[in-house]
Image: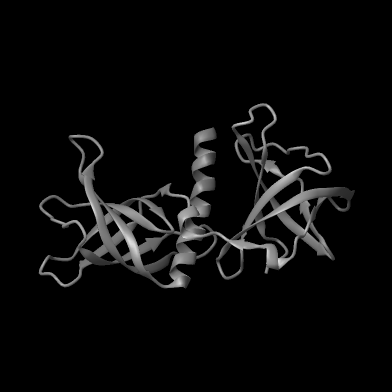
Amino acid sequence: MIAIGTTMQIEMEDHTDEKKTKKLRCRLVDKSKGYLVIDYPINVETEKPSFILDGTKLKASFISESSTVYEFQTEVMGREKRNIPVLLLKDPGKEKYYRIQRRNYVRVEATTDVAVHPVGDRLPAFTTVSVDISGGGCAILIPKGTVLPIQAEVDITMVLPMQKTEQKFVRARCKVIRTYQSRPEAKMRASLQFIDLDQKDQDQIVRYCFERQVILRRQKRD
């Protein structure tokens, strides 16, 4: 389920602030019976290696080859010197890998092209861009003169510019949850909830959000 070379996200308690957690990333370099072997984790905010004591409890997550996000509880079991220094994490087994549910998906700021086709109405189709995206829905800009009634259904096609592959096109049927302005002079926006979305397309959205979150953190740090 988790392949060699997979990037993993790790969360651990921040002992300097009990209300915070440190977010780290690492790469799976090997697997052995009962263990996941990772390179030394890098702090997402500082981009520096983080030293983790043996016995430290961690929460790890990763995206599988089928683009599904899983998380599991683990702990540091030891460390070794190979071609590179590595940590040994306890592998709880795939039965303890839990798929992240829709309500846990992270919403990220993202501007991507979106084609919108209202369903069962005479409202015209239009093209626009997204404001933010999550595995459960998105927000889009509404062009001037366009009306989207609350609870109306629309079919959308969204372009996702992935980092390591060509851009992906995902399609979904959505419900208009609300329309609003972020400030008085701003364009109207619509919050859309996915109500009919192929699992493969949802997995692509989750992967895109995962990648986008890392980019935004880097930009914030810089």
Where is residue 134, by image quadrant? bottom left
**What percent of the width, then of the height, locates residue 175?**
27, 62
Q: Where is residue 92 in the image (x, y as percent from the top left)?
A: 75, 60
Residue placed at 37% from the left, 62% from the top? 159
Number of marks:
0
Left/right of residue 157 with respect to residue 43 in the rendered view: left
Front one among 6 and 34: 34
- What sort of colour scheme is used for the picture? one colour
Q: Nearer the viewer, residue 1 or 129?
A: 1
Indicate whether 32 appears above or below 24: below
Q: Which residue is drawn at 77% across and 53% down?
A: 38
Q: Residue at x 20, y 43 (%)?
A: 187
Work out whether residue 44 can be spotted: yes
Query: Left or right: where does residue 56 sit relative to residue 175?
Result: right
Residue 90, how many percent across, how many down? 79, 55
Q: Is residue 66 above or below residue 144?
A: below
Judge from the rendering whether residue 100 lies leftward or rightward of residue 135; answer left or right.
right
Tell me, yes or no, if residue 166 can be seen here.
no
Q: x, y percentage for residue 166?
A: 47, 65
Left or right: 30 in relation to 205: right
Q: Quadrant location of the N terminus? A: bottom right
Q: Which residue lies furthest to the right in this view?
A: 81
Residue at the spot 17% in from the left edge and 66% down from the top edge: 125
